[in-house]
Structure formats: structure tokens, C-alpha cells
Image: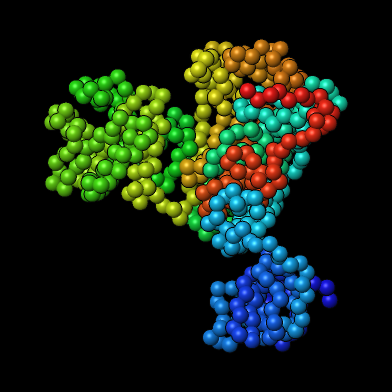
Amino acid sequence: MNTYRTHTCGALREEHVGQLVKLSGWVDTIRDHGGVTFLDLRDQYGITQIVLHEENKANKESVITVSGTVKKRDAETVNSKIDTGIVEVHAENIVMQSRAVRALPFEINESKNTREEVRLRNRFLDLRNPAVRDNILLRAKVVSFLREKMTSLGFTEFQTPILTSSSPEGARDYLVPSRKHHGKFYALPQAPQIFKQLLMVSGFDRYFQIAPCFRDEDSRADRSPGEFYQLDFEMAFAEQEDVFGVAEKVLYDTFKTFSKKEVSPAPFVRIPYAESMLKYGTDKPDLRNPLIIEDLTPFFADVDFAPFKNVIVRGIVATGAAKQSKSFFEKMLAYATEIGMKGLGYISVLEDGSLKGPIVKFLSDEKQATLRKDMNLKNNDTLFFIADSPKTVDNLAAQIRTTLGTQLNLINTEKFEFCFIVDFPMFGINEETGATEFTHNPFSMPQGGLEALQTKNPLDILAWQYDIVCNGVELSSGAVRNHLPEVMVKAFEIAGYTQADIESKFSALFNAFHYGAPPHAGMAPGVDRMLMLIAEEENIREVTAFPMNSNAQDLLMEAPCEVSEQQLREVHIRLRQKN
């Protein structure tokens, strides 16, 4: 017999009645009924009720080992909320393994209602809460499932270096000073991008790993400020649709296995970037929301309405919104003002078919009829208008679309809707410098190859780049990779880099491409964001065992922390005084 237990706290059932058992765990609750004390004993697997007929010397969260006989509960005391609720253990011996001697900073089962600072500083207690614990166990199951799925599809798991060189990939690097090489630094990888491409060049056919990625970015609800994990995979001799086929199999099966919600079946919808920006105002559309954004700029070109002059005008038809109360329209106007709009114009079609709204008087009868037809306006519909500069209007329209969908209860929260965003522009203009720059992954293959780079306006060149989006959350970016050195040189030249820059910053990849590189493609769905959606959590920290807070601090381990002068000397660093 094991010293500590014969069963876990979630294992006992009616068939165990009469058996002598031994359980170990944490004291969850204590109920003194005068002469008889009931303890709930908790471990990772569940809870078992313990009955004591002697004085209780254990306090909450102490760790104890209980030996006793399993008995069936009286019918009126059965607890159907727990798996062991039909039985209880009558204790014959209790061994105190570790007493909890400090006052708890919060009640374990109520930890999610506690200030985050307190939770993270006492994360080991927070993780005892079954609601928190189950997310971490879910994470383990999902990661295991992903590994099995990728292996079944013919992929081989690799590990790539954590200490590497700094490269201009978008976000700030986390830098690690070198002790042996004075004045030089390693960087933690923002992604295994170059390494996985080098594996393809090395002759491996299908790579994957659950890859840690490190980016010194500001925190968001769906982004960790330190490290995050992605299902990174790459395929040799593959095109865009080959990657999509793998992603559809893996993501559909994962979400279907670990959630009871409806999951959109393969093939997932393919939406060109330009279409997504127009119809949804974003490249991360939530397709559960049926509202569509329409471009009304040409329609208002000959309408004498000052707010719509020399701007882009978008419209959203909200079905049935005309029947909403006055407060609904007031709330929408307040929200529009809050996000930076000067107002929120609208036209409602009343029950009798007449039009109502401040803009109606600026439209002739003919224009009103055209608007009804073009926008398919029906009785009780309301057409909302968003007007602003080309740089701003899409973002504003996206926010209005989302808020309308939420306020009108149009979003099906019992569904996962996937889509691929494709045909991203290869280049864009930096708003601050006016320079041409990469808009996505710089290692992507341009559509049209070298000829497109040599003959087209850079802003007209599309790339074989794609994102996968679920319910408005970007799960992954990916691309068909460039594998030709001459294409790499020309693409980077357009973005302002010289060949010397490439040979300096991306020497390994550039050199490898001169020795025969296969066409290859891949992507990297974010594991943390997948878990966030499956667990129905609003913050990525809820699916991470030991997360940093929003200020990039590990409150449990007190990181970042000061180090000694001797440690700094060893890595040749002298700190400047903060101004």
C-alpha cells in the first residue's frame, strides 16, 4: 500500500463501499456539527467528504492523509454536484503532512474574484481553485492532442534554439548579454521562423513544435507581454492550400474535441484582405456577426451634405433596429463619440415604410429610392453611417459593427466561426517616415515572384500571406515562404535594405538559399489564444500557469529583479542612471 493513498479524492464510488482506503489532499472545507465534523478533502482529481468522530485538528488548506472506511451516504445527504457525492470516508486515522499556518489571502474557490495582483503574487494558491486548475489541465490535454494530431499527419517534432541572434522581425527582442563575448548579446527568438525554414533547406519534409516565442510587447487581453506558445509547422514542396488543409484538420478537430460549441466545418471561408477590410473594417472579422459594412462614398458624391464631403462614407444596415428604444440610439451615439467619431448619422425605415433621420432631408426622392434598393432596406431597418478619413474609417466602422451586433444580440455565442484572410499586400507606407516597408512577414513569397517585384508598383504587389481568424481573434499568421536569394534581395531592397544588410542580419538563411532550397510554406496557430477561446476566458493569463501581469512583471518570482554588481561585471554591463 502506498504511504499516502490508495485512491485519489475523485475516485471513490458506490462499489468501494466497505473498503478500507487511504486518501491524501488539502482540507477544502470544515463543517462542525457538534461531535461530528465533516471535511471536504481535495486534490487534482476531485473532492471526497471525510467524516470525523473525534476532535478535528486540521485547518483549511492543510495537507493531510486520511485512512478510513468508505460508507454510503444517507439519501438526503447525497451530493450530486461531485462525482464522489454518493459516498463518504469515515476516518479512523489522520496524519498531518503539512499544516497551513498563515491566514489565506483569499478563499480558494473565490480566487477569480480577487484582485489580479493578489492572485498572481499567490499563484500557487490561485491554482488550487478548480476553476483555475481546470484551465491548466485543459491546456495540457490540448497540447498533447495537438502533438498526436500533427504526428498522425506525418509531421516530425523538432526543437529549435532559445538563445539566438537579434533580427528585425517587428517586435522588440528580449536581449541576453554574453559573458564570453564582450559587448555582444543573444536574443530570445520572437518565433522559430528562420530555424524552421533552415530545417526545410536541410531536407526535412514536415516540421512542427509547440514553440515558445518571446516578444517585448505591451500586454493586451489576448497577448502576453513576455512569452507565448504557438503550434509552429512548416511543409516542404507545399502551396497555400496544402497549409490550409492541415490547419483545417487540426483546428476543427481540436475545437470539436474540447468544446461543445458548433464549429464551422472545412473548408473554412477564404476572404481576401481588401474584401475583409471593406466588409468588416478589420482583417480579424468575427463572422458570427451577420452585419456587413458597405461603401457609400460614390452614393454621396453628389449629395449636398457637408459631413460626408471629402471623406470616405461607410454604411451598416442593422435589421430591425428601427424598433429599438430612443435610449438605444442615444447609447450608440455616445459610443461613437467615445471612439472618436463626430457623430453617428442614421436613416430608419419605419413600420409604414417612410424614412426617418437627420440625413433624409438631404436626399431627393430618387436618391432615397436608390438607397433603399442598393442597401436592400426593409421596414424597421436602420442604416447607420460612418464617415472619416481613409486611414480611420475602417477601424471606426469595425467598432460600430461589433457594438451593433452585441447590442442587438446578433452574435451567436455558441459557435466557433473560422476563416482564412488571404492576399495581404506585400508592402505598405510607413505613416511616420513615408518609407516603403513590409506589411507582414518579410520572408514571404510575393505573388508573381521576381517579375512582380521588378515590374509592379510595390503597393500593388500581393503576397502569399495569410491569417487564420476565429470569432474575431487572430489565431495565426503564415505564408508561402520565399526560397530564392534573388527574390529575397529584391524584396528587401524595396523595403530599404541593401544586400549587405541581408547578409548581415539574415546571413544563415541567405547563405542557405544558395545551396538549393525547396518551395515551402507554413503557419503557427497560437496555443494560448486557442485555449482562451475554448475555455471561454477573456484574458490570456487565465490559461497560463504562471503568467506575468499587464505590466510585464512576474509578481510570484519578483521578476524582473535587480542583480548584483558582480553579475553585471561578468557580462560586461554598466547601468546608466535613470534620467
Residue placed at 59% from the left, 48% from the top? 117
Quarter of the image that includes the C terminus: top right
Residue placed at 37% from the left, 28% from the top? 393
Residue 157 visible, this orientation: yes
Quarter of the image that includes the N terminus: bottom right
Image-quadrant location for residue 227: top right
Establish if 322 lies above or below 375. below
Q: Nearer the viewer, residue 114 or 385?
A: 114
Can you give x and y, in whole percent of width and height, for residue 199 in the image? 75, 33
Q: Is residue 240 left or right of residue 98?
A: left
Image-quadrant location for residue 125: bottom right
Q: Nearer the viewer, residue 69 or 487?
A: 69
Can you give x and y, in whole percent of width and height, for residue 286 in the image? 44, 43
Can you give x and y, in whole percent of width and height, for residue 566 in the image? 83, 31
Residue placed at 48% from the left, 37% from the top? 284
Residue 290 visible, this orientation: no
Establish if 262 lies above or below 69. above
